[in-house]
Amino acid sequence: MKKIGEILKSARVNKKYSLEYIEELTKIKTPFIDAIEEQMWDKLPPFPTVLGFVKSLSATLEIDQNFAVAVLKRDYPPKKLNINPKPDVMSKFTWSPKLTFTIGVSVILVVILGYLIFQYSHFVSPPDLSLESPKEGQIVSGGSVSVFGTTETDAKIVVNNQPVLVSEDGKFSVSMGVTKETEQVVVKAISRSGKERTVSRKIDVQ
C-alpha cells in the first residue's frame, strides 16, 4: 500500500505540476511539500500543521481528503515520549522518632562544642579589667590614693606589686600609700592560666 508521500507525489506528477506551482496554489513552501512527499517528518512542523498541509494538497490534487488524512495518520511516526524509569517523586515528609533523636543529639553536641570553645577562649584570654580610680594625671594628696575597679571573679589583682582581694562580684578596692616619688599606679589582672592584662595611670603626688 502506498504511503501518503507517494500518493501526493504521484498525483502531482500525473498532473504535471511542479513543486513551485503547487506552492503558488496552496501557499505551502516548496521545502515542506518536498518533505511531505519524501516523508521526512523531522523537517516538518508539528503534526497539526502537517495535517493542514495534507488536506490542502489533497484538495489541490483532487485526492479524497478523508483518505489522505487516514493514510497520513497511519504513516506519521508516533511521538517519542521521554519516560523516566525512575521518576523524581517527592516523598512525603514524616517526623519520625529517629529524626527526633538525631536532631536532639546534634543540638546537644553543638551546645557542648560551643561551651568548650567558649571556655577555652576564656581560659587563654587575659581577664577583663576596668580601673575607675585613679584617673589619668590625678592629683593625689594626703599620702594615699584610692584604687578601685572591676575584673573577672576568678582573676587575681596586683596593684604596684601588692595583691588585692577581689570580691564575689569582681570588684576590688584598696587604699594605697604613696610618696612624692610615686609617679604611677599599675594594676594587673591575672587569670588562672597566667594571662595578664595591665592598666597604668600616672598620678601627681603633692
Image (cartoon, rainbow, N blue to C red):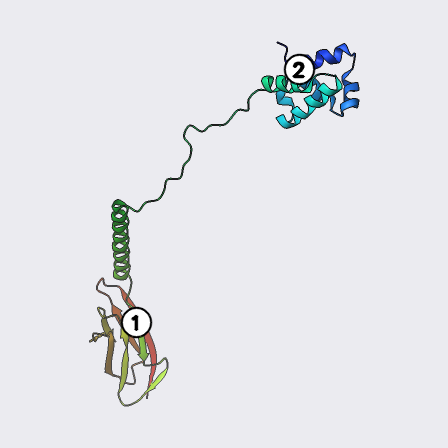
Side of 90 where 75 appears, left or right: right
Q: Residue at x 25, y 59 (%)?
A: 119
Q: Residue 9's image quarter? A: top right
Q: What secondary structure is found at the residue carrying circle 1? A: strand
- What percent of the width, then of the height, locates residue 112? 25, 55
On screen, residue 181 versus residue 73, left or right, reads left
Amino acid at pointer 1: Leu
CA–CA distance between discs 1 and 2? 97 Å
Is residue 38 at all visible to an observer of this figure? no
**Count of marks overlaid on the render:** 2
Q: Quadrant of residue 96?
A: top left
Front-lying residue, 123 or 59: 59
Quick check: 19 above or below 162? above
Query: If you read the primary sequence from the N terminus, does the residue marked by circle 1 or circle 2 appear first?
Result: 2
SS under mark 2: helix
Image point (35%, 81%), residue name: 135
Q: Which three-letter amino acid code belongs to the residue tagged 2?
A: Gly
In the rendered image, which quarter contains the N terminus?
Answer: top right
Q: Badge 2 is on which residue? A: 5
Q: Residues within 10 Å of mark 1 (few under 14, many from 20)?
A: many
Q: Position of residue 147 (x, y in %)?
A: 27, 80
Q: Residue at x 73, y 20 (%)?
A: 59
Residue 186 percent coordinates (x, y): 29, 75
- Image quadrant holding the C terminus, namely bottom left
Question: Does the image show residue 173?
Answer: yes
Residue 81's place in the image compared with 145, above or below, is above
Q: Which mark is residue 129?
A: 1
Q: Position of residue 197 (x, y in %)?
A: 29, 68
Choose between 139 and 155: the one closer to the eye. 155
Q: Are marks 1 and 2 in contact (CB under 8 Å)?
A: no
Residues 180 and 81: in front is 81
Q: Which mark is residue 202?
A: none
